[in-house]
Amino acid sequence: MLSGLILTGVTAAGWMDYRSNRIPNWLVLSFALSAVIFHGLTGGWSGLGLSLGGLGLGLVVLFPLFVIRAMGAGDVKLLAALGAAVTYKNVLIILLVAAAIAGIMALMTVWRGSLLQVLFNVKAMVFATLSGDRETVREFSIDSEQSVGIPFGVSLALATWAFVIFNWSRL
C-alpha cells in the first residue's frame, strides 16, 4: 500500500513537472500528509518521527538550491513529501540516484549542441553567486527565459521507481 502511494505521488508530480515545469502545492501537500498519517497510524510515534524526519531532511537538503534559484520550490517540496513517505533513512538514497539521473539528462541536453553555452552559464552563475551579483544570478536562474531547465521531478520519479523496484529500502 505504501509503495502504491509513493509511486502514485511521484509519478503524478514527475508528469506535471515534465508537462508544465510546475509541481502543484495541492499534490505535494496531499502526498506528504498522506505519508505522515500512514506512518503515524502504522508505526505509532516512532513511525511518525521517522516520517517527519524524512520530511524535514528532504526540505533542508534542497533548500539552499532554491535560495540561489538553481531549483524550483516544487522540487524542494516534492523531496520533502517523498522524505515523509520513505522516511529519513531512505530519502538521501533517492536524492543521490535522482541527482545522477538529472546529470545524465543534463549531459543529453549538452550533447545536443549547447556545451559551450552551458559552460558559460555555469561559470557566470558561480562567479555571480560568489561575488553577490544578484542581477547576474537572476539572469541565469531558473526564472530566466533563456535558461534550459531539467525537470527534477522527473528525475525524482525515476529514482523512486528504481528504489521501489529494486527494494533499496532500509525501513
Image: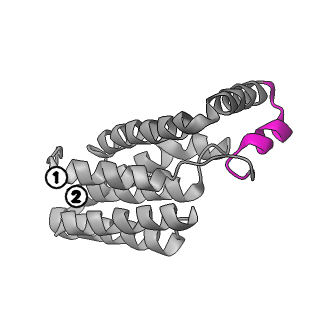
Q: Which range of residues does the magenta coloring cover?
A: 131-143
Select label 1 or label 2 by which is in front.
1
Residue at label 2?
Answer: 47
Left or right of 103 on screen, residue 142: right
Verify whether residue 140 appears in magenta: yes
Whether residue 52 is visible to the viewer of this picture, yes or no, is no
Give residue 1's position: percent from left, percent from top. 16, 70
Disc 1/disc 2 C-alpha distance (Å): 22 Å
Left or right of 138 on screen, residue 8: left
Left or right of 132 on screen, residue 6: left
Write the residue at 51% across / 39% down: 106
Give residue 118's position: percent from left, percent from top. 65, 33
Q: Can you tell which quarter of the image residue 51 is in? A: bottom left
Q: Amino acid at mark 2?
A: Gly
- Quick one: label 2, few (<14), some, or many (20+) residues within 10 Å? some
Write the residue at 32% across / 72% down: 34
Write the residue at 36% across / 37% down: 96
Badge 2 marks a residue whose secondary structure is helix
Circle on res. 165: 1
Q: Main secondary structure of the magenta part?
A: helix
Residue 63 vertical placement versus 111 (above, below): below
Between 33 and 147, which is closer to the camera in this rendering? 147
Q: Amino acid at mark 1?
A: Ile
Asked whether disc 1 touches disc 2, contact meaning CB atoms under 8 Å apart, the reply is no
Give residue 77's position: percent from left, percent from top. 49, 58
Verify whether residue 34 appears in magenta: no
Residue 164 vertical placement versus 110 (above, below): below
